[in-house]
Image (cartoon, helix red, strand yellow):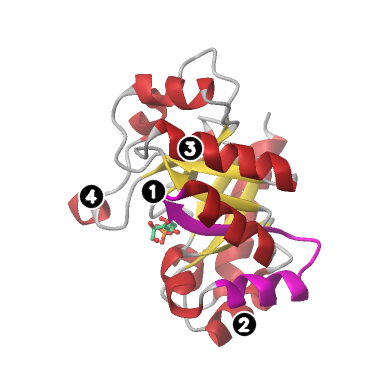
């Protein structure tokens, strides 16, 4: 199980400091949507230059003009770009076909999706990676519920990431659902000691893996 460090609401300097502090405990680096809005593709380029061997996710949250936006992220060095699951089927298909051309991947963000049929449709369109996502603003109503995993069909072959206010306390319940990727932002980036927070989360995952 991988940890994807989500870098949101941070300056470029803070992003680089956090990557440096946590790199031994994290697997994938995500440049968050707001950070991309602040710095554009230049931050994707710079992070890839400095960490060429680490999988880099550009959280583009594309919802239209799929081919152009995905190509933009891949040209800058992203290994994975994100597209919203509620987008038109054409948008999702176009991003998947661009990803195929670049030898890269799309992560389909399920934020706001409540119908398992939509997830089935996304898999039919050719997606192989989705993120179950309990949004930042949804978190005002309380923490994520593991029922979010009910969106997935039992016979689905999708690789699954999960995101939304995950911390060391909420992580164990999610691990029972065996996601491939756990996306963590604030619990690491806003922690008084980010390195320790990342180490703790990695420890929770490793002890779970040792028990199975
Ligand atoms: O995608 C995200 C969110 O929509 C803000 O852009 C976050 O990266 C994701 O939710 C992880 O962050 P935390 O919820 O702070 O763990």
- Residue extending farthest to the left is 141
Q: Is residue 45 magenta?
A: yes
Q: For mark 4, what is the residue? A: 142
The residue under the point 60% across, 31% down is: 128
Q: For mark 1, what is the residue? A: 63
State which mark lies toward you, 1 or 2: 1
Q: For mark 2, what is the residue? A: 17
- Magenta stretch: give its range: 41-65
Of pointers 4 and 3, the one earlier in the residue sequence: 3
State which mark lies toward you, 1 or 4: 1
Alpha carbon distance from label 4 to label 3: 30 Å
Of pointers 1 and 4, the one earlier in the residue sequence: 1
Of pointers 4 and 2, the one earlier in the residue sequence: 2
State which mark lies toward you, 4 or 3: 3
- For the residue pair 43 and 182, the one nearer the viewer reads as 43
Q: How many marks?
A: 4
Q: For mark 3, what is the residue? A: 92
Q: Secondary structure at mark 1?
A: loop
Would you say the residues marked 3 and 2 are in contact, meaning their CB atoms lie under 8 Å apart? Answer: no
């Amino acid at each position: 199980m991988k940890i994807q460090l989500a870098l949101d609401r941070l300056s470029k300097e803070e992003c680089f400091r956090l990557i440096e502090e946590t790199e031994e405990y994290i697997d994938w680096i995500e440049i968050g949507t707001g950070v991309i809005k602040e710095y554009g593709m230049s931050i994707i380029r710079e992070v890839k230059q400095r960490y060429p061997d680490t999988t880099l996710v550009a959280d583009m949250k594309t919802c239209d003009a799929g081919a152009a936006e995905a190509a933009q992220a891949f040209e800058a060095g992203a290994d994975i770009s994100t597209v919203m699951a509620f987008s038109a089927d054409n948008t999702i298909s176009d991003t998947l076909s661009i990803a195929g051309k670049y030898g890269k991947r799309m992560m389909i963000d399920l934020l706001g999706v409540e119908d398992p049929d939509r997830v089935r449709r996304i898999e039919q369109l050719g997606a192989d990676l989705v993120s179950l996502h309990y949004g930042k603003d949804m978190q005002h109503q309380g923490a994520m519920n593991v029922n979010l995993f009910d969106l997935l069909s039992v016979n689905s072959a999708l690789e699954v990431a999960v995101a939304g206010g995950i911390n060391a306390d909420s992580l164990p319940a999610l691990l029972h659902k065996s996601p491939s990727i756990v996306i963590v932002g604030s619990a690491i980036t806003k922690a008084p000691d980010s390195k320790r927070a990342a180490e703790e989360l990695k420890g929770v995952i490793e002890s779970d893996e040792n028990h199975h």
